[in-house]
Image (tube, helix red, strand yellow):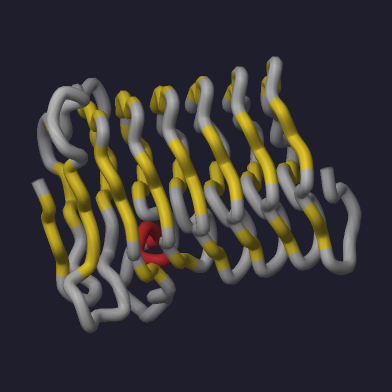
Amino acid sequence: NNMAYYDGYKLLIKGDFTAGDHLQASTVFTKLPGTDGWGGIIFDNQTGKSWAMENCVVEYTYKTNTALGFQIYDSRGAIAMVNADYLNMKECTIQNNTALYGAGFYAENSDAFMGTCTFANNSSTFSGGAMYMEAGSTPDFQECDLYNNNAGTNGGAVALNGVNNPSFSACNVSDNAATQNGGAFYLVNGAGAEINSCEIYNNSVTTGNGGA
């Protein structure tokens, strides 16, 4: 149930994809020992597909490449979705990932459901320690835990940029940190979010506003 990847290698999904089973040991997507990290799981320019992940761990991605010829998802998200739907995730853990933006999860014009998932100890150079979402993205997060994530600029846990409307229900968002604004959430350029029955506490900022 364990899959390990070399530096920079990524799992680019084409077609349907199913991983994990709550009745079995966790399926772990991770790096090979002695490497900096790997390139994550990518859902790119596909709609009407059936993607499911259950009881999976996605960890130790290292996504900071902005060289000419690389795609946007090469610097964002252990799980990255670009013009893609629909991903159904349950009881998954996204941890110890590093990226320029949204180290745990990145979405642009994409849709997903995540239930009882954990985003922990993820770190971004810029915005969105755990996740970063851009225009046209409406994921639904239910009973998820987001803790100990860190952003170098804004949105220690979550950064939203552009007109999108994800929902967070019965989630625990705690102990996240941002250097500038929004220790828990940071919304900009018309972004919105539905936040219902969530516990948001112990989040902090170093120099800006909105520690939550």
**Is residue 121 positioned above or below 87 on the image?**
below
At horizontal 20% and vertical 61% (from top left) the residue drawn is: 10
- The relative height of residue 123 versus residue 161 in the rendered view (above or below) is below
> Horizontal and vertical percent for residue 18?
14, 30
Residue 96: tell me if it is visible: yes
Q: In the image, 188: left or right of 92?
A: right
- Quadrant in which residue 60 is drawn: bottom left
Observer-nearest of 101 and 109: 101
Q: Is residue 98 left or right of residue 49?
A: right
Q: Nearer the viewer, residue 96 or 78?
A: 96
Q: Is residue 176 left or right of residue 36?
A: right
Q: Residue at x 22, y 83 (%)?
A: 34
Q: Name the image quarter holding residue 154.
A: bottom right
User: How far across and how far down the image is residue 44, in percent?
Assistant: 27, 44
Name the quarter where the C terminus is drawn: top right
Report if residue 18 is visible in the image: no
Q: Position of residue 210 (x, y in %)?
A: 87, 48
Left or right of residue 56: residue 148: right
Q: Nearer the viewer, residue 143 or 51?
A: 143
The residue under the point 72% across, 28% down is 199
Vertically, is 152 above or below 128? below
**How many numbered marks are there?**
0
Question: Which percent across, then down, holds residue 3?
Answer: 12, 56
Please report the residue visible at 60 percent of the width from the left and 19 percent of the height from the top: 169
